[in-house]
Image (cartoon, rainbow, N blue to C red):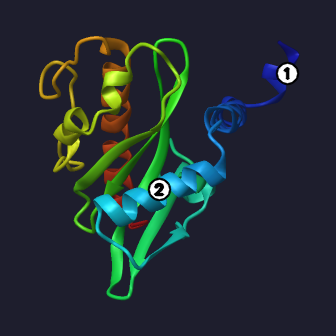
């Protein structure tokens, strides 16, 4: 209780978010990068593309009221310039977090959503490309609602609702990034 009085809520929230983020990115960086490279080359068709960290800090994100951290954002550049960006995020399954990535075009429209790490027995249906395609084309102007404008999926109610809410939150954060001229 004394600790809570010494630290303000914002500091505690920041520490908690960093802890959760470290815990939630259990997938190894090497494995994640291999999977991302495959998606970029195969699904986005960008064979000669470089990934780079976003050019804003956690402080910039906090000032803008964005609930993500800078190490989750990556810019995609080709010889033609920026091809867009992607965000690596986690959501909660039935018992464990899973990791997914959302690729955005320069127009802030979702190009691809891919679940890159899912370790549960239940809910694996949300990893299927056919189900994930319904997020493609969504923009920060859209509001996503599971069972309303995002179809439910048998056997994956908890994971489906979780990823839908998480992507909706991500879209709102992308909107804030644009409003604060961080993108």
Q: Which residue is mark 1?
A: 3
- Residue 29, horizontal then vertical, whole percent: 65, 51
Quarter of the rendering containing residue 79: bottom left
- Residue 15, horizontal then vertical, whole percent: 72, 35
- Residue 100, horizontal then vertical, whole percent: 44, 40
Q: Residues within 10 Å of mark 2 (few under 14, many from 20)?
A: some
Labels in figure, total: 2
For the N terminus, give its image quadrant: top right
Compared to 180, does 171 lie above or below?
above
Residue 36 is labelled as 2
For the C terminus, give its image quadrant: bottom left
Residue drawn at x 46%, y 15% as measured from the top left = 121
Distance from the alpha carbon under mark 2 to that under mark 1: 40 Å
Compared to 48, does 62 lie above or below?
above
Identify which residue, 48 or 66, lies in the foreground: 48
Q: Is residue 42 left or right of residue 88?
A: left
Residue drawn at x 29%, y 58% as measured from the top left = 43
Residue drawn at x 41%, y 77% as measured from the top left = 77
Identify which residue, 96 or 74, lies in the foreground: 96
Identify which residue, 26 or 171, lies in the foreground: 26
Residue drawn at x 33%, y 73% as measured from the top left = 83
Sequence-wise first label, 2 or 1 = 1
| Mark 2–mark 1 CB contact (< 8 Å) | no
| Outermost residue to the left | 149
Dot in front, 2 or 1: 2
Identify which residue, 123 or 19, lies in the foreground: 123
């Amino acid at each position: 209780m004394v600790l809570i009085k010494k630290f303000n809520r914002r500091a505690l929230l920041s520490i908690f978010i960093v802890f959760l983020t470290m815990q939630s990115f259990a997938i190894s960086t090497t494995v994640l990068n291999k999977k991302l490279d495959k998606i970029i080359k195969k699904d986005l068709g960008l064979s000669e593309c470089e990934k780079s960290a976003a050019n804003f800090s956690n402080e910039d994100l906090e000032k803008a009221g964005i609930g993500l951290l800078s190490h989750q954002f990556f810019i995609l550049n080709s010889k033609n310039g920026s091809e867009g960006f992607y965000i690596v995020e986690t959501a909660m399954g039935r018992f464990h977090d899973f990791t997914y990535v959302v690729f955005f075009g320069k127009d802030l429209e979702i190009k691809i959503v891919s679940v890159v790490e899912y370790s549960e027995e239940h809910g694996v249906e949300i990893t299927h490309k056919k189900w994930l395609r319904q997020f493609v084309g969504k923009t920060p102007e859209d509001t996503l609602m599971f069972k309303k404008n995002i179809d439910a999926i048998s056997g994956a109610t908890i994971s489906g609702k979780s990823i839908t809410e998480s992507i909706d939150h991500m879209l709102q954060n992308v909107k804030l990034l644009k409003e604060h001229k961080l993108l």
